[in-house]
Image: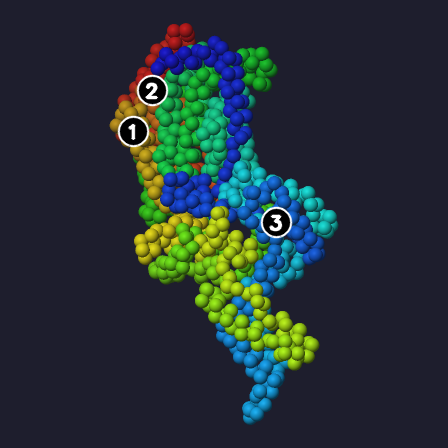
Amino acid sequence: MRGLVDGLVDLGGRRPWFVILSAVMILGACWNYARHLQVRSDVLELLPRESPGFQAFERRIERVGGRATIVILAESPDRAANEHLIDALHEKIETSDVRPMISSIEAGTKDVKKFFEANKWLYATVDDLEEADAKLDQQIAIKSGMVEDLEDKPASESALGMDSFKEKFEKKAKEKDDFPTGYFASPDGTQIAMRIFTTTSGMGGGNDEQLFARIRQLTEEVKPTSFHPDMKVGFGGDIPNAEAEKESLVHEAMIATLIAAALILGGVVWFYGSPWALVLVGFPPLFGVGCAYAFATYHYGYVNASGAFLGAIILGNGVNYPIVLYSRYKEFRARGMSPEVARRDAVWNAFRAELVGATVASIAYGSLTVTRFRGFSQFGVIGFVGMFLVWISMIPCLPALIVIIERLEERGPKWLRERPAALGNDESRGPVARFVGNFTEARPRLIVGVAMAITVITCIKLPSFIRDPWEYDFDKLGSQNARKRGAFVVSGKADKILSGRMNLAGSLVLADHVDQVPMVKQRILENDAADPKGAMIEGVTTVNDFLPGNAELQKKKLAVLDRLRERITPRVLASLSEEEQEKIKTMIPPESLRELTPVDLPGMLKDRFSEKNGTVGTVFYVRYKPEISRNDGHNMLRMSSTLDGVRLPDGTQVDTASRATIFAEMIRSMERDGPLATGVAFLAVAIVVIAATSSLRGAFAVLLSLVLGVVWMLGSAALFGERLNFLNFIALPITFGIGSEYPFNIFDRSRLLGGDVTRAVKLHLGAVALCSYTTTIGYGSLLFADNQALRSFGRLAIGGEIACFLVAIFFLPSLLHLIGAHTINRPKKLDMTKGAHDDHGGEPAPSKAA
């Protein structure tokens, strides 16, 4: 292994331009290829494809389409102008090339209004019809004089007493229509909406983006301001909202990565005192990020919400390896080694610690791949590839860059030259490192005692947190500012307009056959009534609710209507005034009245209850009580329990997946896969640490430091009310990598120094501190995100980073002093230029070339 590593280092030293240009070409190709990577922010992209809930929901999509919406909102002071624009847009889209991607277009209720007006008699109750028939019979008798001899003769009424029934029948019919003008308009007409139901799922990217872009183009082509100078057109609904979330996510990911890169590289420049350090330390992680995203483009074609900020995280974590290696090189140069020997021996001296660091980091990411929850597994795979390639690329590239930059420094101005590395008389790398090293040696019991006290305090709320650590308030997981502007604002305006009886709000549920719907409905209501926390369902809407009754009831109505029609003969009409005749004629039931079925409903209503193959009636909607929050995960679990997998009396199980199924599946997946990923990560890291330390005391010290760091992180989260979610959970296994990498670096350096813990701290604290700074900045970039789940990821990860850093530089050295993990044998300072040999425990002896 030593020969292979030395060979790669020597290749970089002999042919540095070849190595770097080859790496730059690969990096350029990767970044260019990664330009095609899509970001999908839909929650569906987080769920395991093999889960029953996900598969049931996909089958639902196959049968009824995605039903994702695009809402177009026309706003101007002129009602007529708004109506004309909506009509023009409707016609334009109806005849466009995107019509095959559209399930239905709802531009108004004119057809619905016409349908209910034509069939208003059927929507009257049987009692009202019987009463109208009796009243008509009575009034005709009075008009004809047949009841003249009765002592209590009823009074003759205008229009045969039908005026009140006309009003009643029309009112009954209008109950189905909330929009008297035939448009989805606000009361003052200044806002009119048009709703498009698409065949897509609304998960962002691909067809959704193409369709929405084309809709916007078609809207521009009709020139909205030509209808009114103040005309404004806005877009809302599922697809525009998803795009707004995605644009916000992508924009923030880019800004966050740039900010993280600037702060990370600025810190590197300050630490090393030279801008050249930017290239030296920054190139390997940029290489890893580019290759990771290229891999994601090839393997997945997209990243979900958790992967959008992965570049900043890899950058923050991956920069640790070149920092440690370059710091080791600078130290060896300060001790008098020649550049060639310092490069070779620095790589090999740091190889063990770097290999362990890369291994535990890769394990931390890789542990997420054992889960089925794609929000974890995809992040883990991409992160694993990125971190591994950072380490691999560093071995040949960093020595090559050192050679190139040292040559350029010789020819460049003095102000561009890096300041020479220097060590203190005690070989410390600065006053802070000197203080920490001396303090941990002088006061180990005090430091360990304080660490234990902090552990006790952070454990106060930890048991209850561990029992149920998950965030159930979905309002705390989505974007915040994005929901206050653009598509979300338009969606809010449209919802107010469309929130009438014709708006079928609630969970869309799908039965296998039409005849199952009544039984499925009954079983859902029974499940809801049996909910120990109380009923949630306000009602269930089926296609039959828009019919004038079942077949038997309609036949009764038609029989009464036939009698009404037969009573109004030409002779009866002739006995009335012209005004009365006109009124009565509008009350004569047309002979075309017949029994209505779901297929007779107007298109707008029928489409809402139809499958893609034309089957009508298998779709129905479950409406929840107003006080039931759809953003409460506990309610989602209850809804899923009520709706999913309904079993009929004959044993048939109906695939009744809904949106609640998806959110409930996400919660269950996290509850199932979270402990699995955590256990795998800890076990794998523990095995690596035990194998790498070759010392039970050393392994104990490193693993105890890891446990303390994690306990402090979770305990602090519990104390400050932080909860785990589908994104920030990832910080937990990643912290296992950091929590073992930092203490192992200190421990391994002390091993190489013959057990001199104090000297190891003085030499290595600066590099560990810079590593922690860059990692914290990488996580800190997430705090700029509008997405609240990502911000919580940043907060939790930063807490874990700070905890692990403090444990590594204070607790671990103190513990090593107490338990005596090594036998300390401090050597005298050696003159490395004269061929000094092994520095008592593994520090590099100069190569023969020295």
Closest to the observer, 421 or 714: 714
Question: Whole-percent x and y of residue 457?
Answer: 35, 45
Residue in the image at 44% along x and 61% along y: 539
The residue indicated by pointer 1 is 687
Q: Does the CB distance between marks 3 and 2 fall below 8 Å?
A: no
Please determine whether, in this image, residue 722 is positioned above or below residue 303.
below
What distance separates the C-alpha of mark 3 from that of mark 2? 69 Å
Q: Name the N-terminal-most of marks 1 and 2.
A: 1
Question: Considering the numbered disc 2 on the image, is that residue within a helix, a strand or a loop?
Answer: helix
Question: Whole-percent x and y of residue 1?
Answer: 35, 15
Numbered tag placed on residue 72 in the rendering? 3
* Residues packed near mark 3 inside 10 Å, few (<14), some (14 to 19) or many (20 plus): many
The residue indicated by pointer 2 is 752
Question: Whole-percent x and y of residue 292?
Answer: 46, 28
Question: Considering the numbered disc 1 on the image, is that residue within a helix, a strand or a loop?
Answer: helix
Residue in the image at 57% along x and 38% along y: 210
